[in-house]
Amino acid sequence: LSIRQRMTEILDALIERPRCELAEIFHPEEGRMGVAVTTVAILELTRTRAIDWSQETPFGPVTLFRVVGEHEREEHTVENDDERPSGE
């Protein structure tokens, strides 16, 4: 099990959909080592501000989501500018 590989898997999951529950990220068949690797991967992604997470209610599910960086916002803005009809 690789922390980097798990980080990539988490980011890929969050590209496919904007949010996912923490419980969906863990793989019980990997045992304690899998839990440890996944936890460190989540903490590292949070530290680097690639993802963030929230919990709406006490004891409720923890939701992970990607953080959109400045460069991604700029790219999105440029893409939207290209889609505008001419003459605006």
Image: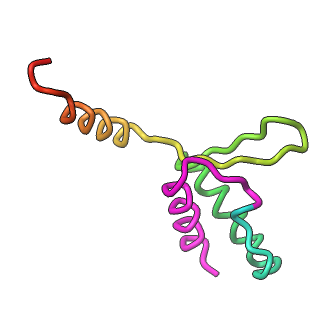
Where, quadrant-wise, is the C terminus in this rendering?
top left
Q: Residue 81's x, y, as percent?
A: 22, 31
Would you say the magenta stretch is mainly helix, strand or loop?
Answer: helix
The residue sitting at 60% across, 70% down in the picture is 6
Q: Residue 41's x, y, as percent?
A: 64, 63
Which of the two residues, 37 or 12, is positioned nearer the viewer here?
12
Task: Report which quarter residue 86 is drawn in.
Answer: top left
The residue sitting at 37% across, 36% down in the picture is 73
Q: Residue 59's x, y, as percent?
A: 90, 44
Q: Magenta residues?
A: 1-23
Where, quadrant-wise, is the N terminus in this rendering?
bottom right
The residue sitting at 78% across, 35% down in the picture is 56
The residue sitting at 32% across, 38% down in the picture is 76
Q: Residue 17's x, y, as percent?
A: 54, 52
For this orientation, the residue located farthest to the front is: 85
Colour setting: rainbow
Whether residue 50 is situated above or below residue 10 in the rendered picture: above
Magenta highlight on residue 14 = yes
For this orientation, the residue located farthest to the top is: 88
Which of the two residues, 43 or 59, is positioned nearer the viewer here?
59
Magenta highlight on residue 10 = yes
For this orientation, the residue located farthest to the right is: 59
Q: In this view, does 64 lie to the left or right of 77?
A: right
Task: State the count of labels.
Answer: 0
Which of the two residues, 18 or 11, is positioned nearer the viewer here?
18
Q: Is residue 83 left or right of residue 65?
A: left
Task: Report which quarter residue 53 is drawn in.
Answer: top right
